[in-house]
Image: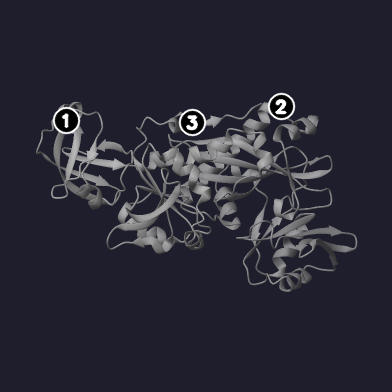
Protein backbone atom coordinates (compact mmCIF):
# COMPACT_ATOMS: atom_id res chain seq x y z
CA UNK A 1 0.00 0.00 0.00
CA UNK A 2 1.41 3.36 -1.00
CA UNK A 3 1.73 6.01 1.72
CA UNK A 4 2.05 9.14 -0.44
CA UNK A 5 -0.40 11.61 1.15
CA UNK A 6 0.09 14.42 -1.40
CA UNK A 7 -1.00 12.59 -4.52
CA UNK A 8 -3.82 10.08 -4.86
CA UNK A 9 -2.04 7.17 -6.49
CA UNK A 10 -3.49 3.99 -7.95
CA UNK A 11 -0.86 1.34 -8.35
CA UNK A 12 -1.72 -1.20 -11.06
CA UNK A 13 0.08 -4.28 -12.45
CA UNK A 14 1.89 -4.08 -15.79
CA UNK A 15 -0.49 -6.51 -17.51
CA UNK A 16 -3.54 -4.50 -16.44
CA UNK A 17 -1.94 -1.28 -17.69
CA UNK A 18 -1.23 -2.87 -21.05
CA UNK A 19 -4.74 -4.37 -21.42
CA UNK A 20 -6.44 -1.02 -20.75
CA UNK A 21 -3.92 1.23 -22.48
CA UNK A 22 -2.85 2.96 -19.26
CA UNK A 23 0.53 4.57 -18.60
CA UNK A 24 2.29 5.98 -15.59
CA UNK A 25 0.97 9.46 -14.83
CA UNK A 26 -2.42 8.95 -16.50
CA UNK A 27 -5.39 10.42 -14.64
CA UNK A 28 -8.34 8.07 -14.10
CA UNK A 29 -11.59 8.14 -12.14
CA UNK A 30 -12.15 5.58 -9.42
CA UNK A 31 -15.59 5.05 -7.91
CA UNK A 32 -16.52 3.10 -4.81
CA UNK A 33 -20.14 3.09 -3.72
CA UNK A 34 -21.39 6.68 -3.75
CA UNK A 35 -17.90 8.27 -3.71
CA UNK A 36 -15.45 8.99 -6.50
CA UNK A 37 -11.92 10.34 -6.80
CA UNK A 38 -9.36 11.21 -9.44
CA UNK A 39 -6.26 9.05 -9.20
CA UNK A 40 -2.84 9.12 -10.84
CA UNK A 41 -1.63 5.85 -12.34
CA UNK A 42 1.60 4.27 -11.19
CA UNK A 43 2.65 0.95 -12.74
CA UNK A 44 4.18 -1.86 -10.72
CA UNK A 45 5.66 -5.28 -11.50
CA UNK A 46 3.62 -6.71 -8.63
CA UNK A 47 0.41 -8.61 -9.32
CA UNK A 48 -1.63 -6.72 -6.72
CA UNK A 49 -3.32 -3.33 -6.95
CA UNK A 50 -2.65 -0.62 -4.36
CA UNK A 51 -4.30 2.62 -3.26
CA UNK A 52 -2.42 5.44 -1.57
CA UNK A 53 -3.60 6.37 1.90
CA UNK A 54 -4.92 9.69 0.58
CA UNK A 55 -7.01 7.85 -2.00
CA UNK A 56 -8.29 5.45 0.66
CA UNK A 57 -9.39 8.42 2.76
CA UNK A 58 -11.12 10.11 -0.17
CA UNK A 59 -13.12 6.95 -0.88
CA UNK A 60 -13.74 6.25 2.86
CA UNK A 61 -12.15 2.82 2.65
CA UNK A 62 -10.36 0.92 5.41
CA UNK A 63 -6.99 -0.66 4.75
CA UNK A 64 -6.23 -4.34 4.14
CA UNK A 65 -9.31 -5.10 2.04
CA UNK A 66 -9.63 -7.19 -1.10
CA UNK A 67 -11.98 -5.57 -3.61
CA UNK A 68 -13.43 -6.42 -6.98
CA UNK A 69 -12.85 -4.20 -9.99
CA UNK A 70 -14.92 -3.41 -13.07
CA UNK A 71 -14.51 -0.94 -15.91
CA UNK A 72 -17.15 1.71 -16.55
CA UNK A 73 -15.74 3.30 -19.68
CA UNK A 74 -12.53 4.96 -20.78
CA UNK A 75 -10.33 5.55 -17.76
CA UNK A 76 -13.26 5.02 -15.39
CA UNK A 77 -13.29 2.11 -12.93
CA UNK A 78 -15.39 0.95 -10.00
CA UNK A 79 -14.19 -0.80 -6.86
CA UNK A 80 -16.52 -3.04 -4.91
CA UNK A 81 -18.92 -4.46 -4.27
CA UNK A 82 -19.91 -2.35 -1.27
CA UNK A 83 -22.69 -4.15 0.63
CA UNK A 84 -24.61 -2.54 3.46
CA UNK A 85 -26.84 -4.39 5.91
CA UNK A 86 -29.55 -2.08 7.26
CA UNK A 87 -30.63 -3.12 10.74
CA UNK A 88 -32.59 -1.84 13.74
CA UNK A 89 -31.38 1.15 15.75
CA UNK A 90 -31.34 -0.91 18.94
CA UNK A 91 -29.05 -3.48 17.28
CA UNK A 92 -26.61 -0.68 16.42
CA UNK A 93 -26.79 0.80 19.92
CA UNK A 94 -26.09 -2.59 21.55
CA UNK A 95 -23.53 -3.52 18.88
CA UNK A 96 -25.22 -6.90 18.68
CA UNK A 97 -23.75 -7.96 15.34
CA UNK A 98 -23.02 -11.64 15.98
CA UNK A 99 -25.65 -12.76 13.46
CA UNK A 100 -23.83 -10.82 10.73
CA UNK A 101 -20.37 -12.34 11.25
CA UNK A 102 -21.02 -15.16 8.70
CA UNK A 103 -21.89 -12.54 6.06
CA UNK A 104 -18.70 -10.62 6.84
CA UNK A 105 -16.48 -13.70 6.77
CA UNK A 106 -17.87 -14.84 3.41
CA UNK A 107 -17.22 -11.41 1.91
CA UNK A 108 -13.74 -10.85 3.33
CA UNK A 109 -11.99 -11.64 0.02
CA UNK A 110 -14.69 -10.30 -2.28
CA UNK A 111 -15.64 -6.77 -1.22
CA UNK A 112 -16.79 -4.55 1.63
CA UNK A 113 -19.64 -5.44 3.96
CA UNK A 114 -20.77 -3.21 6.78
CA UNK A 115 -23.75 -2.94 9.14
CA UNK A 116 -25.60 0.33 9.73
CA UNK A 117 -28.82 1.74 11.14
CA UNK A 118 -31.29 4.50 10.11
CA UNK A 119 -29.42 7.10 12.19
CA UNK A 120 -26.09 6.23 10.53
CA UNK A 121 -26.90 7.87 7.19
CA UNK A 122 -25.35 11.21 6.22
CA UNK A 123 -26.93 12.04 2.87
CA UNK A 124 -25.16 15.40 2.56
CA UNK A 125 -21.67 13.89 2.68
CA UNK A 126 -22.76 10.66 0.94
CA UNK A 127 -21.28 8.60 3.75
CA UNK A 128 -22.64 6.15 6.28
CA UNK A 129 -21.20 5.65 9.73
CA UNK A 130 -21.27 1.88 10.00
CA UNK A 131 -19.47 -1.13 11.46
CA UNK A 132 -17.30 -3.66 9.67
CA UNK A 133 -15.82 -6.85 11.03
CA UNK A 134 -12.06 -6.66 11.48
CA UNK A 135 -11.03 -10.29 11.27
CA UNK A 136 -7.47 -9.59 12.40
CA UNK A 137 -8.74 -8.00 15.62
CA UNK A 138 -11.84 -10.25 15.80
CA UNK A 139 -14.12 -7.33 16.56
CA UNK A 140 -16.44 -4.87 14.86
CA UNK A 141 -14.98 -1.44 14.15
CA UNK A 142 -16.86 1.79 13.57
CA UNK A 143 -15.96 4.13 10.71
CA UNK A 144 -17.33 6.10 7.76
CA UNK A 145 -18.13 4.30 4.50
CA UNK A 146 -19.47 5.36 1.12
CA UNK A 147 -23.12 4.67 0.41
CA UNK A 148 -23.20 1.03 -0.68
CA UNK A 149 -23.86 -0.49 -4.09
CA UNK A 150 -26.60 -2.64 -2.59
CA UNK A 151 -28.47 -2.80 0.72
CA UNK A 152 -29.82 -5.88 2.45
CA UNK A 153 -32.72 -4.56 4.57
CA UNK A 154 -33.18 -6.48 7.84
CA UNK A 155 -35.61 -4.02 9.47
CA UNK A 156 -39.16 -5.28 10.02
CA UNK A 157 -41.41 -3.67 8.93
CA UNK A 158 -39.78 -1.61 6.19
CA UNK A 159 -39.07 2.07 6.85
CA UNK A 160 -39.57 3.48 3.36
CA UNK A 161 -38.16 6.86 4.40
CA UNK A 162 -34.77 5.16 4.76
CA UNK A 163 -35.16 3.71 1.28
CA UNK A 164 -35.88 7.10 -0.28
CA UNK A 165 -32.73 8.59 1.28
CA UNK A 166 -30.58 5.64 0.21
CA UNK A 167 -31.95 5.43 -3.32
CA UNK A 168 -31.31 9.11 -3.93
CA UNK A 169 -27.59 8.29 -3.79
CA UNK A 170 -27.62 4.63 -4.91
CA UNK A 171 -30.29 4.62 -7.60
CA UNK A 172 -33.36 2.34 -7.81
CA UNK A 173 -33.56 -1.44 -7.46
CA UNK A 174 -30.55 -1.75 -5.17
CA UNK A 175 -32.37 -2.57 -1.89
CA UNK A 176 -33.80 -5.94 -0.88
CA UNK A 177 -36.07 -7.01 0.57
CA UNK A 178 -37.70 -3.84 -0.69
CA UNK A 179 -40.70 -4.73 1.46
CA UNK A 180 -39.97 -6.84 4.54
CA UNK A 181 -43.65 -6.88 5.58
CA UNK A 182 -46.08 -7.97 2.87
CA UNK A 183 -49.28 -7.84 4.87
CA UNK A 184 -51.84 -10.58 4.54
CA UNK A 185 -54.33 -8.52 2.55
CA UNK A 186 -51.64 -7.38 0.11
CA UNK A 187 -50.55 -11.00 -0.22
CA UNK A 188 -53.99 -12.27 -1.24
CA UNK A 189 -54.87 -9.30 -3.44
CA UNK A 190 -51.63 -9.71 -5.39
CA UNK A 191 -51.88 -13.48 -5.79
CA UNK A 192 -55.58 -13.31 -6.73
CA UNK A 193 -54.62 -11.46 -9.93
CA UNK A 194 -52.62 -14.47 -11.13
CA UNK A 195 -54.68 -17.21 -12.78
CA UNK A 196 -52.63 -20.11 -11.40
CA UNK A 197 -52.05 -18.82 -7.88
CA UNK A 198 -55.63 -17.63 -7.41
CA UNK A 199 -56.62 -21.31 -7.23
CA UNK A 200 -54.28 -21.87 -4.28
CA UNK A 201 -55.39 -19.11 -1.89
CA UNK A 202 -58.39 -19.26 0.48
CA UNK A 203 -61.10 -16.65 -0.02
CA UNK A 204 -60.04 -13.60 1.96
CA UNK A 205 -61.77 -10.30 2.66
CA UNK A 206 -61.01 -7.26 4.83
CA UNK A 207 -62.93 -7.15 8.09
CA UNK A 208 -65.12 -4.08 8.39
CA UNK A 209 -68.52 -4.90 9.85
CA UNK A 210 -70.17 -7.85 11.51
CA UNK A 211 -71.99 -8.50 8.21
CA UNK A 212 -68.60 -9.39 6.67
CA UNK A 213 -68.23 -12.24 9.16
CA UNK A 214 -71.84 -13.36 8.70
CA UNK A 215 -71.41 -13.46 4.92
CA UNK A 216 -68.28 -15.65 5.12
CA UNK A 217 -69.95 -17.99 7.61
CA UNK A 218 -72.83 -18.56 5.20
CA UNK A 219 -70.29 -19.89 2.67
CA UNK A 220 -67.88 -21.82 4.89
CA UNK A 221 -67.92 -24.05 7.95
CA UNK A 222 -65.44 -21.72 9.62
CA UNK A 223 -63.31 -18.62 9.22
CA UNK A 224 -60.03 -17.27 10.50
CA UNK A 225 -59.69 -13.67 11.66
CA UNK A 226 -56.10 -12.43 11.31
CA UNK A 227 -54.41 -9.06 11.83
CA UNK A 228 -53.00 -8.02 8.46
CA UNK A 229 -49.57 -7.36 9.96
CA UNK A 230 -49.58 -9.97 12.72
CA UNK A 231 -46.61 -12.10 13.73
CA UNK A 232 -46.20 -15.45 15.47
CA UNK A 233 -49.93 -16.16 15.51
CA UNK A 234 -50.74 -13.25 17.80
CA UNK A 235 -54.31 -11.99 17.57
CA UNK A 236 -55.59 -14.81 15.33
CA UNK A 237 -59.08 -16.16 16.06
CA UNK A 238 -60.59 -19.31 14.58
CA UNK A 239 -64.39 -19.42 14.35
CA UNK A 240 -66.13 -22.75 13.64
CA UNK A 241 -69.87 -23.28 13.25
CA UNK A 242 -71.47 -25.91 15.49
CA UNK A 243 -74.98 -26.97 16.49
CA UNK A 244 -74.71 -24.87 19.63
CA UNK A 245 -73.58 -21.71 17.80
CA UNK A 246 -70.00 -20.63 17.18
CA UNK A 247 -66.81 -21.96 18.75
CA UNK A 248 -63.89 -19.51 18.94
CA UNK A 249 -60.28 -20.43 19.61
CA UNK A 250 -57.48 -17.95 20.15
CA UNK A 251 -54.14 -17.67 21.95
CA UNK A 252 -54.44 -16.17 25.42
CA UNK A 253 -51.81 -15.41 28.02
CA UNK A 254 -51.85 -18.98 29.30
CA UNK A 255 -52.03 -20.62 25.91
CA UNK A 256 -54.92 -21.59 23.64
CA UNK A 257 -58.39 -20.59 24.88
CA UNK A 258 -61.76 -21.83 23.60
CA UNK A 259 -65.08 -20.05 24.10
CA UNK A 260 -68.60 -20.53 22.75
CA UNK A 261 -70.64 -17.61 21.45
CA UNK A 262 -74.11 -17.23 19.94
CA UNK A 263 -73.57 -14.95 16.97
CA UNK A 264 -70.97 -13.13 14.91
CA UNK A 265 -71.47 -9.83 16.73
CA UNK A 266 -69.79 -11.33 19.78
CA UNK A 267 -66.63 -11.90 17.74
CA UNK A 268 -66.10 -8.14 17.51
CA UNK A 269 -66.56 -7.93 21.27
CA UNK A 270 -63.90 -10.62 21.64
CA UNK A 271 -61.53 -8.50 19.54
CA UNK A 272 -62.26 -5.58 21.86
CA UNK A 273 -61.49 -7.72 24.90
CA UNK A 274 -58.22 -8.85 23.33
CA UNK A 275 -57.26 -5.24 22.62
CA UNK A 276 -57.17 -5.94 18.88
CA UNK A 277 -60.22 -4.06 17.55
CA UNK A 278 -58.27 -1.04 16.28
CA UNK A 279 -55.96 -3.17 14.13
CA UNK A 280 -56.91 -3.92 10.50
CA UNK A 281 -58.03 -7.54 10.15
CA UNK A 282 -58.85 -9.98 7.38
CA UNK A 283 -61.46 -12.74 7.32
CA UNK A 284 -60.29 -15.93 5.67
CA UNK A 285 -62.05 -19.18 4.86
CA UNK A 286 -60.93 -22.11 7.01
CA UNK A 287 -59.23 -24.87 5.04
CA UNK A 288 -59.95 -28.42 6.12
CA UNK A 289 -56.39 -29.52 6.57
CA UNK A 290 -54.70 -32.83 6.00
CA UNK A 291 -53.33 -34.26 9.26
CA UNK A 292 -50.20 -36.18 10.14
CA UNK A 293 -50.89 -38.53 13.07
CA UNK A 294 -54.01 -36.39 13.69
CA UNK A 295 -51.78 -33.31 13.95
CA UNK A 296 -52.08 -30.19 11.75
CA UNK A 297 -48.92 -29.23 9.88
CA UNK A 298 -47.57 -26.36 7.82
CA UNK A 299 -44.62 -25.90 5.48
CA UNK A 300 -42.16 -22.99 5.57
CA UNK A 301 -40.73 -22.96 2.05
CA UNK A 302 -37.47 -21.02 1.87
CA UNK A 303 -37.54 -19.22 -1.48
CA UNK A 304 -34.40 -17.26 -2.38
CA UNK A 305 -32.67 -15.45 -5.23
CA UNK A 306 -29.28 -16.60 -6.50
CA UNK A 307 -26.48 -14.74 -8.26
CA UNK A 308 -28.20 -15.12 -11.64
CA UNK A 309 -31.36 -13.30 -10.47
CA UNK A 310 -33.28 -16.59 -10.41
CA UNK A 311 -35.51 -17.97 -7.67
CA UNK A 312 -34.62 -21.26 -6.00
CA UNK A 313 -36.02 -23.45 -3.21
CA UNK A 314 -33.13 -24.95 -1.24
CA UNK A 315 -35.12 -26.05 1.85
CA UNK A 316 -38.65 -26.84 3.03
CA UNK A 317 -39.17 -26.93 6.79
CA UNK A 318 -42.19 -28.50 8.50
CA UNK A 319 -44.03 -27.26 11.58
CA UNK A 320 -46.48 -29.54 13.35
CA UNK A 321 -48.91 -28.81 16.21
CA UNK A 322 -50.68 -30.90 18.86
CA UNK A 323 -54.02 -32.38 17.71
CA UNK A 324 -56.02 -29.89 19.78
CA UNK A 325 -54.08 -26.83 18.60
CA UNK A 326 -55.25 -24.73 15.65
CA UNK A 327 -52.03 -22.75 15.12
CA UNK A 328 -48.83 -24.19 13.69
CA UNK A 329 -46.59 -21.35 14.88
CA UNK A 330 -43.54 -22.28 16.93
CA UNK A 331 -44.45 -19.47 19.34
CA UNK A 332 -47.84 -21.15 19.85
CA UNK A 333 -46.27 -24.46 20.86
CA UNK A 334 -45.76 -26.18 17.49
CA UNK A 335 -42.68 -28.30 16.86
CA UNK A 336 -40.44 -29.04 13.89
CA UNK A 337 -40.26 -32.42 12.18
CA UNK A 338 -38.27 -33.47 9.14
CA UNK A 339 -39.98 -32.85 5.82
CA UNK A 340 -39.04 -36.32 4.56
CA UNK A 341 -40.49 -37.95 7.69
CA UNK A 342 -43.78 -36.19 7.11
CA UNK A 343 -43.88 -37.27 3.46
CA UNK A 344 -43.24 -40.86 4.52
CA UNK A 345 -45.95 -40.65 7.19
CA UNK A 346 -48.61 -39.25 4.88
CA UNK A 347 -48.27 -42.22 2.56
CA UNK A 348 -51.23 -42.57 0.21
CA UNK A 349 -53.01 -39.50 1.58
CA UNK A 350 -51.16 -37.44 -1.00
CA UNK A 351 -52.42 -37.86 -4.59
CA UNK A 352 -48.85 -37.39 -5.84
CA UNK A 353 -45.54 -39.14 -5.67
CA UNK A 354 -43.01 -37.58 -3.29
CA UNK A 355 -41.10 -36.09 -6.20
CA UNK A 356 -44.26 -34.64 -7.75
CA UNK A 357 -45.30 -33.10 -4.43
CA UNK A 358 -41.88 -31.53 -3.81
CA UNK A 359 -41.88 -30.12 -7.33
CA UNK A 360 -45.40 -28.77 -6.84
CA UNK A 361 -44.47 -26.97 -3.62
CA UNK A 362 -41.31 -25.60 -5.22
CA UNK A 363 -42.97 -24.42 -8.43
CA UNK A 364 -45.83 -22.74 -6.52
CA UNK A 365 -43.35 -21.00 -4.24
CA UNK A 366 -41.17 -19.76 -7.09
CA UNK A 367 -44.23 -18.53 -8.97
CA UNK A 368 -45.50 -16.77 -5.82
CA UNK A 369 -42.14 -15.10 -5.21
CA UNK A 370 -42.00 -13.92 -8.83
CA UNK A 371 -45.50 -12.44 -8.69
CA UNK A 372 -44.86 -10.71 -5.36
CA UNK A 373 -41.58 -9.29 -6.59
CA UNK A 374 -43.30 -7.52 -9.49
CA UNK A 375 -45.32 -5.53 -6.94
CA UNK A 376 -42.94 -5.26 -3.98
CA UNK A 377 -39.44 -5.96 -5.31
CA UNK A 378 -36.59 -6.33 -5.37
CA UNK A 379 -37.05 -9.32 -3.10
CA UNK A 380 -34.22 -11.73 -2.37
CA UNK A 381 -35.49 -14.00 0.37
CA UNK A 382 -38.99 -15.10 1.37
CA UNK A 383 -40.38 -17.63 3.82
CA UNK A 384 -43.65 -18.87 2.29
CA UNK A 385 -46.17 -20.62 4.53
CA UNK A 386 -48.19 -23.38 2.85
CA UNK A 387 -50.80 -25.73 4.27
CA UNK A 388 -52.32 -28.82 2.60
CA UNK A 389 -56.04 -29.51 2.35
CA UNK A 390 -57.69 -32.90 2.86
CA UNK A 391 -57.54 -33.56 -0.88
CA UNK A 392 -53.79 -32.89 -1.01
CA UNK A 393 -54.11 -29.43 -2.54
CA UNK A 394 -51.50 -26.91 -1.33
CA UNK A 395 -52.82 -23.56 -0.08
CA UNK A 396 -50.67 -20.43 0.08
CA UNK A 397 -51.18 -18.64 3.40
CA UNK A 398 -48.52 -16.00 3.97
CA UNK A 399 -45.20 -14.54 2.81
CA UNK A 400 -42.60 -13.57 5.41
CA UNK A 401 -40.25 -10.96 4.00
CA UNK A 402 -37.79 -11.22 6.87
CA UNK A 403 -37.71 -14.91 7.80
CA UNK A 404 -35.71 -15.73 10.89
CA UNK A 405 -33.28 -18.57 11.48
CA UNK A 406 -34.80 -22.02 11.86
CA UNK A 407 -34.37 -24.16 14.96
CA UNK A 408 -31.03 -25.95 15.09
CA UNK A 409 -32.65 -29.40 15.16
CA UNK A 410 -34.50 -28.74 11.89
CA UNK A 411 -31.22 -27.84 10.17
CA UNK A 412 -30.07 -31.45 10.45
CA UNK A 413 -32.25 -32.26 7.44
CA UNK A 414 -30.60 -29.52 5.38
CA UNK A 415 -27.02 -29.23 6.63
CA UNK A 416 -26.04 -27.10 3.62
CA UNK A 417 -28.66 -24.51 4.57
CA UNK A 418 -26.42 -23.38 7.45
CA UNK A 419 -24.14 -21.89 4.79
CA UNK A 420 -26.69 -21.27 2.05
CA UNK A 421 -28.80 -18.94 4.20
CA UNK A 422 -25.88 -16.51 3.87
CA UNK A 423 -24.59 -17.53 0.44
CA UNK A 424 -27.81 -16.88 -1.44
CA UNK A 425 -28.39 -13.28 -0.23
CA UNK A 426 -24.74 -12.44 -0.85
CA UNK A 427 -24.80 -13.90 -4.34
CA UNK A 428 -27.90 -11.79 -5.05
CA UNK A 429 -26.00 -8.77 -3.70
CA UNK A 430 -23.28 -9.41 -6.28
CA UNK A 431 -25.91 -9.43 -9.00
CA UNK A 432 -27.66 -6.22 -7.89
CA UNK A 433 -24.37 -4.42 -7.36
CA UNK A 434 -23.13 -5.26 -10.86
CA UNK A 435 -20.26 -7.44 -9.61
CA UNK A 436 -21.68 -10.84 -10.53
CA UNK A 437 -18.64 -11.34 -12.79
CA UNK A 438 -16.46 -11.96 -9.74
CA UNK A 439 -15.01 -15.43 -9.48
CA UNK A 440 -16.79 -16.34 -6.26
CA UNK A 441 -17.98 -19.68 -4.88
CA UNK A 442 -21.30 -17.96 -4.24
CA UNK A 443 -21.92 -17.96 -7.97
CA UNK A 444 -22.02 -21.76 -8.07
CA UNK A 445 -25.50 -21.70 -6.53
CA UNK A 446 -28.01 -22.80 -9.14
CA UNK A 447 -31.70 -22.16 -9.58
CA UNK A 448 -34.41 -24.77 -9.33
CA UNK A 449 -35.13 -27.56 -6.88
CA UNK A 450 -32.11 -28.89 -5.03
CA UNK A 451 -34.10 -30.77 -2.39
CA UNK A 452 -33.43 -34.44 -1.63
CA UNK A 453 -36.17 -36.78 -2.79
Q: In the displayed structure, would residue 449 be above or below residue 406?
A: above
Residue at 74 percent across and 53 percent down: it is 327
> How far is the residue under mark 2 from the one under mark 3?
27 Å
Residue 17 tag number: 1
Quarter holding residue 285: bottom right
Q: How many marks?
A: 3
Tell me the quarter of the image containing the C terminus.
top right
Residue at the disc numbered 2: 353
Residue 222 tag number: none
Toward the right, the furthest residue is: 244
Is residue 373 visible in this depiction of the protein? Answer: yes
User: Viewer-nearest of labels 1 and 2?
Assistant: 1
> How far is the residue under mark 1 from the one under mark 2?
59 Å
Tell me the quarter of the image containing the N terminus.
top left
Q: Secondary structure at mark 1?
A: helix
Residue at the disc numbered 3: 445
Amino acid sequence: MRKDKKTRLWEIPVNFARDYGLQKGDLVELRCGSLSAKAVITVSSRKNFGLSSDLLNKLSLPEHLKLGLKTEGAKRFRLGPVIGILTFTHVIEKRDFSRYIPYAMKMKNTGILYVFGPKSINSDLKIINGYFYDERRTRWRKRDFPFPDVVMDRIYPTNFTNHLILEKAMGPNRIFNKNTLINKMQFFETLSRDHLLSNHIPETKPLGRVEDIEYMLTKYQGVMLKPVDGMKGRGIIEVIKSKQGLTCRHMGREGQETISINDAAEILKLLDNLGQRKRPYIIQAVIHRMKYNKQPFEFRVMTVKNGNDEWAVPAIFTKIADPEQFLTNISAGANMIFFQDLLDGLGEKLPYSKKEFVNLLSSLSIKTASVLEKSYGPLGKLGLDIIVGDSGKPWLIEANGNPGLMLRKSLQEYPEWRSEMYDYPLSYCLFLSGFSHLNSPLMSLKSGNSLPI
